[in-house]
Image: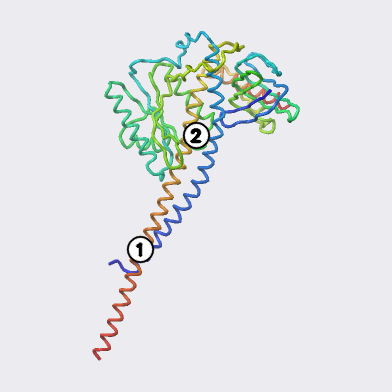
Amino acid sequence: MNVELVSPAKSLAKVKATKLQVPGKDGYLGILPGHAALVSELGLGELIVEGEAIQPIRLLINGGYVEVVNDQVIVLVDAAEALTEIDVARAHKSRERALERLATKDPAMDVTRAQSALARANARIAFCK
Amino acid sequence: MPSLKDTKRRITSVRNTQKITHAMKLVSAAKFSRANQAVLAARPYGAAFDRIVGRLAAGVENLENLESMELLRFVEVPKRVLAVVVSTDRGLCGSLNTNVFKAAVRYVRENTDQGCEVDIAAMGKRAGQFYRKVGLTPMITREKVLERPTYQSAKAITDELSGLFTSGKYDRIVLIFSEFKNILTQTPRVKQLLPVVTPDFGDDEHDTLDFIIEPDAHTVLEGMLRKHVINTLFRVLLEGGASEHGARMTAMDSATKNAKEYIRKLTLLYNRARQAAITKELIEIVSGAEAV
């Protein structure tokens, strides 16, 4: 199957793949050749593309869409980071910051923002392990 | 007739200016190619996005509840409109900003005539300066929007604008910006950002596929609408950047040419003055010799 990975700023990859894993909004989706037509929202997590003639692609993505039609797969991602682009130390720091913010009882604190920052940091740390 | 020394000084001064404009042209050319590349690189996403929306809309049957989405809230006669004027931060780019401001002024006048209130959001330093000069206070001012725009920055701006729209503060939000046609032509354009102008789902060439949709069609389409708004703004910013550098490049090129022409004229003047001085001296010598 053909997999096309695109972010708003550029086209990331266009490859022939045998296996694709994407983080759906409610859990990971595995897509193999011959998959039924599908459109799904994506969440935060790890995307893996594997193929016979290519090096596996591993990216940490946050939000987007995947569409599968007749073995043509398009993955639209809002943000994608490769392993080499992630600063683990920074992720740890922002994790602590988010936890600190969540621990305070300040009513002005934006809970959703702090929680998503925490989720992002956790995902980054887990991704780099 | 200006003295020899003065003319010489002016030539030097023009030549220095020419050096500057030439250097600026080269810098703009480099920046332009980067901006242009960004525009081109962003195209696959837009194309893929439209394709998915088109197929999805064709595949999903009950789109009636589409009207309930807040980003599509359409008002027949808008009462309050927000005009987002996108300009550059720096000048020396020909009539690029002026044209955008003219279009903005026209848009505001047309709408005020129809009894609707128009507020301004000034994006870019020049727009801020322009509205300060005419004595208007923009609702929002932002600078450096065209300097290497990222999807994140477009998202931040869109979130702010969508908030103003969904809260009911404005019935319509338009973007006024210069559209990048090619390096020589940039035309001012008014484009409606919100409510979202639904793309034409009319063509039935897409096969109606039985899609599995996660979590459900309504949520996915609503999410995609939101992305569509961000992407629209993102593209406007990218094109704005390309327009800016393209316009500056052309402006600096013609400035360099003008300087060249001016130098030519001044040199002619200088040589004429020099010749006249020599002739005068010769006449003086000759007539002096005759008098002896």
Instruction: Classify mark 1: residues with Cα within 10 Å, few (<14), some (14-19) or many (20+).
Output: some
Residue designated by label 1: B266
Disc 1 is attached to a residue of which chain?
Answer: B
| Lower sequence index among marks 2 and 1 | 2
Find residue B135 and report its horizontal and vertical position in percent.
30, 34
Find residue B238 and report its horizontal and vertical position in percent.
49, 34
Q: Quadrant of residue A85?
A: top right
Left of B50 or right of it: where is B251?
left
Disc 2 is attached to a residue of which chain?
Answer: B
Find residue B267 and report its horizontal and vertical position in percent.
37, 65
Q: Nearer the viewer, residue B242 or B56?
A: B56
| Residues flagged by tags 2 and 1 on a common chain | yes
Q: Amino acid at mark 2?
A: Leu
Residue designated by label 2: B238
Q: Amino acid at mark 1?
A: Leu
- What SS does tag 2 mark? helix
Q: Residue at x 29, y 28 (%)?
A: B109
- What SS does tag 1 mark? helix
The correct choice, above or below, for A110 with respect to B264 in the image is above
The correct choice, above or below, for B207 with respect to B253 in the image is above
Instruction: Classify mark 2: residues with Cα within 10 Å, few (<14), some (14-19) or many (20+).
Output: many
Find residue B89 and report its horizontal and vertical position in percent.
43, 39
Instruction: Calculate the distance from the C-alpha at mark 2 to the C-alpha at mark 1.
Output: 42 Å
Check residue A117 in the rendering and tell me which mark sits there, or answer none: none
Which residue sits furthest front?
B205
Q: Residue at x 27, y 82 (%)?
A: B284
The correct choice, above or below, for B152 with respect to B12 in the image is above
Q: Nearer the viewer, residue A84 or A20?
A: A20
Quadrant of the rendering where the N terminus of chain B is positioned: bottom left
